Amino acid sequence: MEEQDGMKEKKLVLEQFEELYGGHGQIRLFFAPGRVNLIGEHTDYNGGHVFPCALGYGTYAAVRERQDRKVRLFSLNMPKEIIECDLDHLMPETDLGWEAYPQGVIWAYEKWGYSLPQGIDIAYAGNIPAGSGLSSSAAIEVVTAIAIKNLFNLEDVGLVKIAQLCQYAENHYNGLSCGIMDQFTSALGKKDTAIFLDTNTLDFDYVKLPLKDEKLVIVNSMVKHSLVSSAYNERQSECKRALCDLQEIMGINELCDLSPKLFDTYQSAIKDDICRKRARHVVHENARTLKAVDALVEGDLETFGKLMNESHVSMRDDYEVSCEEMDFLARLGWETPGVLGSRMTGGGFGGCTVSLVKEEAVEAFTQKVTGEYQKKFGIRPKVYVAEIGDGAREIAIES
Ligand code: GAF
């Protein structure tokens, strides 16, 4: 991946904006990051806890309002054409490309009663690879949302509302039944800090990462298997079925209302074996997340790392969202001295692993992962030490 300071993307996106759209009027620049989730996977649509961080990587948007009701979108990372639409004629459709993410946000603003007074021109440039599982889609949604908020002075739209609006857009315009973790992190991330978020109440705490001689290392497998969104939606409905079965015998609102002990006692109420496995992952992953945050706060990184490993095993065996490449990468982490924990991060079926690695072991881990993964799969993975950055913001343009 590119440098994490975004200098290149900032420059490119501004140049491209002027070249494409020319004209007069003030251009403004915005940024929203991708995320890496440390633990708490597939809990965010089950009323559970998550523990993600915003990355230094993300999406930049150069933006200017127009005098009519047109919206023009261009991305330096996508096939080179301007996509034009009208503020008043946006509709969820199938077969849309990347533009469905920003269009969905504009559509959601309208749905939520924020009638935008005029159209906009936007150019995007990002440095998160699409499909890497580091939330490039949340970044483009959130950067669009914050740009609109600032351009049209929507003062009652705070960052939490931006996250909710972007999740709504992704659920109802793009058809992915995702939780709120990615959009929340992109909007509210904080440098060198993870967000401990209760997705049921949206209460959250910032937890400073007590990393002194340790690094968070992300390995991009460079694979993303198809059926990601259909499998994701399938998992979501399996969880719903498990919940409905449990609700016949107990008063719970979400799977994550259950402790592992209660789950073990009442799990036989879940009729379908697959749904029972999915629920087991969710309940145990939520409990693991709570334990992991406690361990981190106490500076017990060994325990935190072990819980990361357990999280991967549960995603592999009970939730079944891992794949051969992810299991291979996680296992390399488990076998390498100085790696405290290693797991797949994000929705699954490819993308990236995240590992907590002692600084002195980073080089050896990088060598090992690169060599062995390439030997096995014929693909060169990308390895980088994550910088944990701030959430969405406007960036001053230097003249
Ligand atoms: C994807 C989704 F968008 C998130 O909401 C979350 O469910 C994650 O997968 C799995 O934890 O990134």
Image (spheres, rainbow, N blue to C red):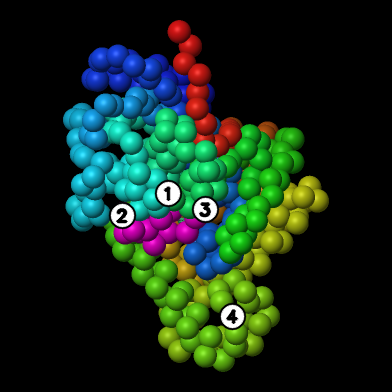
> Which SS class for mark 4?
loop
Residue 397 in sight in this render: yes
**Residue at point 30%, 33% (across, down):** 118
Q: Disc 1 marks which residue?
A: 166
Viewed as shown, does residue 177 lie left or right of 354? Answer: left
Residue 335 at x, y = what percent?
59, 51
- For the residues bearing labels 1 and 3, Cβ distance under 8 angstroms: no
State which quarter of the image contains the N terminus.
Answer: top left
Between the residue at mark 2 and the residue at mark 4, the CA separation in whole angstroms equals 29 Å
Amino acid on which the number 3 mark rests in the picture: Met
Q: CA distance from mark 3 to mark 4?
A: 22 Å
Q: How many marks?
A: 4
Crowd band around label 1 with a 10 angstrom C-alpha radius: few (<14), some (14–19), many (20+): many
Judge left or right: residue 213 versus residue 186. Answer: right
Left or right of residue 218: residue 78: left
Q: CA distance from mark 4 to mark 1?
A: 27 Å
Q: Residue furthest right?
A: 298
Q: Badge 4 is on which residue? A: 252
Q: CA distance from mark 1 to mark 3?
A: 11 Å
